[in-house]
Image (spheres, helix red, strand yellow):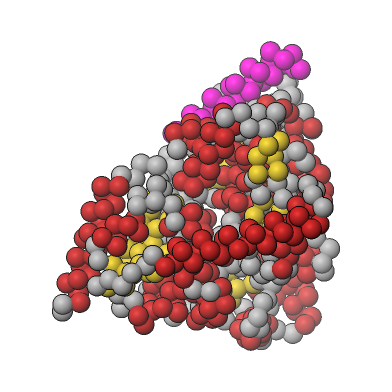
Amino acid sequence: MKITFPHMGNVYIAVEAFLRGLGHEPVTPPPSSRRTLELGSFHSPAEVCLPFKIALGNMLEGMAQGAEAVLMIGGWGPCRLGYYAEIQRLLLQALGREVEFITLEVPRRPYAPYAANLRKLIAPTRFSSLARGAGLSWAKLKAVEELEGLALKVRPREMRPGAATEYLQEQLERLRAAETAAEVEELRQAARRDLPQLAGRERNQPLRLGIVGEIYTVVEPFANLRLEERLGYLGVEVVRTISLVEWVTNHIFKKAAGLSSLAPLRRLAAGYLRGFIGGHGLESIARSVALARQNLDGIIHILPLSCMPEIVARGILPGLSREQGIPVLSLVVDEHTAEAGFQTRLEAFVDLVGRRVGSLGHRQSSVSRS
Amino acid sequence: MELGLASCVDCACLPLKAYVGHVQFLVQQGLSLLFVPQVVSLFPKEWTCSVLLGLPDLVKQYVPPSVRLLTPVLDARRGIHQLTLQYLHFGLQWARPSPVLRAWRKAVRAQRTWERAYQAVSSPGRFRLLLLGPRYLTDDPYLNGNLREKLRDLGAEVLCPADFSDATTAAACSLLRKRPYWTCTRRSLGALAHAVPQLDGVVTISPFGCGAEAMQGVLITSLTGTRIPHLELHVDEHTSPVGLFTRLEAFCDLLERKRSG
């Protein structure tokens, strides 16, 4: 079956491998673009959040390329994401598009549709190829994350601006084409060797900013207007707090095994937020405290407009910022976010943080302008 | 409202701003103890919403440290009787079991009397409308611009999800492929699915920026198709009652015209 799926950062590399392992033909939609968003927004309810619109646009573009089914994740709240798939199915149905929806979520009664879905998904496969596909997909996911992480470190230090991003794109293409775990490992080794060489001799320690917020807007460069790159070019080393590998481990493997625990996050967030509020609300608060303890220079909090859990987090962050002594910038994104305004706010924040670091005398600031 | 707007986080929904406004008012009166429960869930396997989950922690940001917050957790995800237990448990911090039990019974009775009195108000009209939305909007004349009263003046009989029992709405939701996991949305859609045959129109009211309500329109259309006219109202602090009234009038006119063929 030809299956399409929405984008989320570079996850498509792993999903492709997984679907191939299952014996399906993945139809990867073109990278999210203005067109994707317009297509998605046009058919979405007005007030629904940005990730929904982009994902719907991805699906429509994937279907235009001949996909017969859509793979999507579900859930049981309280975040809206859990209900996305169902709404998107209804919207596509109302458009008169014949497409199958395969929603991955923890099943609840009635079980029959889930069983049917699963059968469709694993029908063309043998166990050995499934296992190989899953293994390869996991290796790729880890490799993607490692490469992106290396690029974050190199970008503020690179000799020629843009070199790290170029290298990353090239390697990701290779990673996408890789067919065995050994190839993936080779690419990883190569990146570990090559990427650091793009960095110049270190004069000053660059500013270090952490990014927290709603997972999709953190991970998807189109949704956050290439936030990580922008910060990199402003001479900032970005510290990611959201790891997809970790997310998959926690939300899929551990939850299935009943081992998932929020206790460590709760301990971090103690005094600010008492527990789970849906989405990444608790994570945003807990990770912010962790970043403050790691002595980072500042935090950027990013959320889609009308994201309920992150609004709560946003209400709590100013207090956290005061008490933990770390500057926080909350950025809200939706389909009307303009690049220039976004850039200006980032520059202003980086300037402020740089000056603050300078005046605190921790170390010399090194905010270079590109 | 002004108090809430001045202090509450922007992007917050109207009811949250109003809530923070109430809190600020009470704090200004010099209160030292404030009851802000964390309402996680009111029905098994369902949630209220993320904002209510984070409410006590959010309110904490807006009150001086001298004010103590009482924040019992109300969570019915593992069974509706849990709610009662949680209330009683909360009460036991203050008094011995027998007065707690008595207070609980009294509270339940008072709530029931109020609900009954409230429902008795609805009177037959020329057409029947179902008003959907969170109760803090449908039942608050200030926040909804006195919507119910106006609809009644326009000759409508107004039904609410609260007129149907939880069992009814939960059962009626089986018409949807996936049951909504927010209690309010489930009640709304269940009431709609149940009452569709006897309805002339649907009015939904939701706070601007409410995540749960944003997707409800699609579900309503999937339930009713194009058979039943549907008016969607979004309110925030800038909504003027006059504009709201005009839309209601226009909607009721349309219903009237549709009826006379």
Q: Is residue A124 visible?
A: no
Percent coordinates x, y for residue A57 in the rendering = 45, 62
Left or right of A222 in this view: A132: right
- Look at the magenta stretch and give its main secondary structure: helix
Q: Quadrant of residue A353?
A: top right
Residue at 56% across / 50% down in the picture?
A308
Percent coordinates x, y for residue A13 in the rendering = 64, 61
Instruction: Residue A123: say if magenta.
Output: no
- The quadrant in which the N terminus of chain A is found is bottom right
Residue at 35% across / 64% down in the picture?
B203
- Between A277 and A287, the residue placed more toward the observer is A277
- Between B209 and A186, the residue placed more toward the observer is B209
Left or right of B122 in this view: A210: right
Q: Which residues are magenta?
A: A340-368
Percent coordinates x, y for residue A271 in the rendering = 75, 38
Residue at 46% across / 46% down in the picture?
B14
